[in-house]
Structures are given as structure tokens and as C-alpha cells.
Image (cartoon, helix red, strand yellow):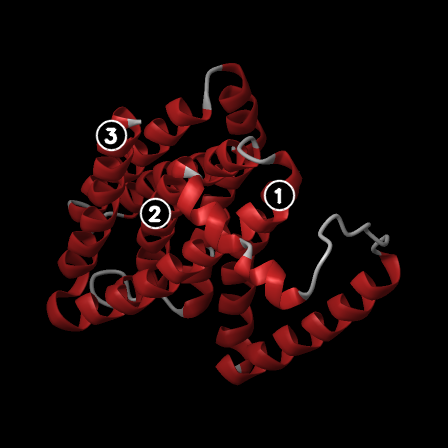
Amino acid sequence: TIMSGLLIGILFSRTVSGFVGAHFGWRSMYWVASLLMILLCFTLFFLLPEDKNNFKGTYKSLMFSLIPLIKEQYYLKTAALTGALLFGSFTAFWTTLIFLLEDAPFHYNSQAAGLFGVVGVAGALAAPLVGRLADKKSPLFTIGFGIKASVLAYLIFFFSSHSVIGLIIGILILDIGVQSTHISNQSLIYSLVPEARSRLNTVYMFSYFVGGASGSALGAYAWSIDKWQGVCYVGLVFTILALMVHTIFNKIK
């Protein structure tokens, strides 16, 4: 439920920002986002219950305690790497999609382009189903499924630079693939050291967003060099590397 809310928020934010940007200018969206974050800060402060701290020590020692986890937990490293690569492919697509849609033959404005975020919500809604499948089969199974789906999505994108239907199908597959991998990775790492779940998630999410930032930067750079084909090459490299990591290193284990 938490992950579904997070993912739906990420995708709907594109639709909302497209609408606000088209009608009130792109700067207005930053004011809206700032006000919402201030409101959220106060809401969480007053409504979230206090949580007991299981770690005895200083914040510095808490951060240093991440190092043994990284060294000792094999699946934490593979999950962090595959998660980073898949989220990189995700952000490479969503960062540059607006460039494609504003260009020929589409010539869409930011409001129309933002509506593509609604399509991606279907992938986020699949999150609870993926979680149950990971519990029934195994997280490694659904991780592999998600990575392969993401590779397929980028192959569709490569041949859909002039097709709205192709982009929609690719978006559905990419979002399901990336969310399947993300949720399954978290399910996997949470089972490693139950008493250190927050620290395990810290390592994983740090890597995850480093991958996302890298994907955004490389996607924009690839667009400046080779337009949509360049973006697809970046996405394919990210997803194929993730597939190699999952296949080779999990087989070794």
C-alpha cells in the first residue's frame, strides 16, 4: 500500500505539473510543490506516532554500521545494483519523454504530455499483486520478470518514436517491470536481517536514487546527441546490465 501510494504520487505529479505548467508557467509548479512539502512536514510531525529506536548508539555509529551490512549481505549488493539500474532506466524515459512529445510529429504541450503519467499509474496499481507473487514464488523470480519486462519496454520504445499506441504499451510494461523489481528487491532485503530493516533500506534507497539521478542526466545528454534513439540506447544499456547482474551474480550465489 505504501509503495503504491508513492509510485502513484510520482506519476500523477507529472500530470499535475504538466497542467500547472501549461496554464500558469513552470515557475508556479515550484511554488505549489514548496507549499505542499511545508504542509506535509507539519502533517507528519503531528500525526506520525513515535517509533522506538532499536539502535543503541550515536548517529555517526549508526551510519558506520551500514558498512558491515554492505560487506556481509550479498543480496543487498545485488538488489541495490539492479534497483539503481532499473530506476535509472525509468528516469531516463520520463525525463526525456516531454522532449519527444513536444517534437514532430506530436507537437504536444506540457499538459498533454503530462497525461501520459496517468497511463503509468496502471503499473503502480500492480504493486500489491507483485508483492503477493513475490511472497508466493520468490523475490528473485519477480525481480527477473521485472527486469525482462523493462528490456522489452525499451525495445518497444525504440520502434515507437512516432506511435502514441506504442509509447502507451511501453509505458505500461516499463512501469510494471520497474515496480515489480523494486518491490521484490525490498521484500528480499527485508528478509536478510529483520532487526536492521531500516539500515538495509537506507543502503538500497541511496543506491536507488543515485541510479535515478544518473538515468535523468544520461537520458538528457543522450537526447542532446541522438534524440530518442540515444535515450533508448541508454535505457537498453541500463536494463541489460541489470539483467546481467541478476542472472550472473544470483546464479553464483
Amino acid tagged 3? Thr
Seen at 49% across and 32% down, the residue is: 188
Q: Secondary structure at mark 1?
A: helix
As drawn, 201 above or below 29: above
The picture places residue 166, in percent across and down from the top left corner, at: 26, 42
Q: Quadrant of the C terminus?
A: top left
The foreground one among 134 and 192 is: 192
The foreground one among 71 and 13 is: 71
Q: Secondary structure at mark 2?
A: helix
The picture places residue 245, in percent across and down from the top left corner, at: 25, 38
Q: Residue lying farthest top? A: 136
- Marks 3 and 2 close (CB-CB < 8 Å): no
As drawn, 210 above or below 2: below
- The numbered disc on residue 206 is none
Task: Please state if 112 lies on the left or on the right of 103 as rendered.
Answer: right
The foreground one among 123 and 49 is: 49
| Count of labels in the image | 3
**Residue at the disc numbered 2:** 81
Q: Residues within 10 Å of mark 2 (few under 14, many from 20)?
A: many
Q: Residues within 10 Å of mark 3 (few under 14, many from 20)?
A: few
- The numbered disc on residue 196 is 1
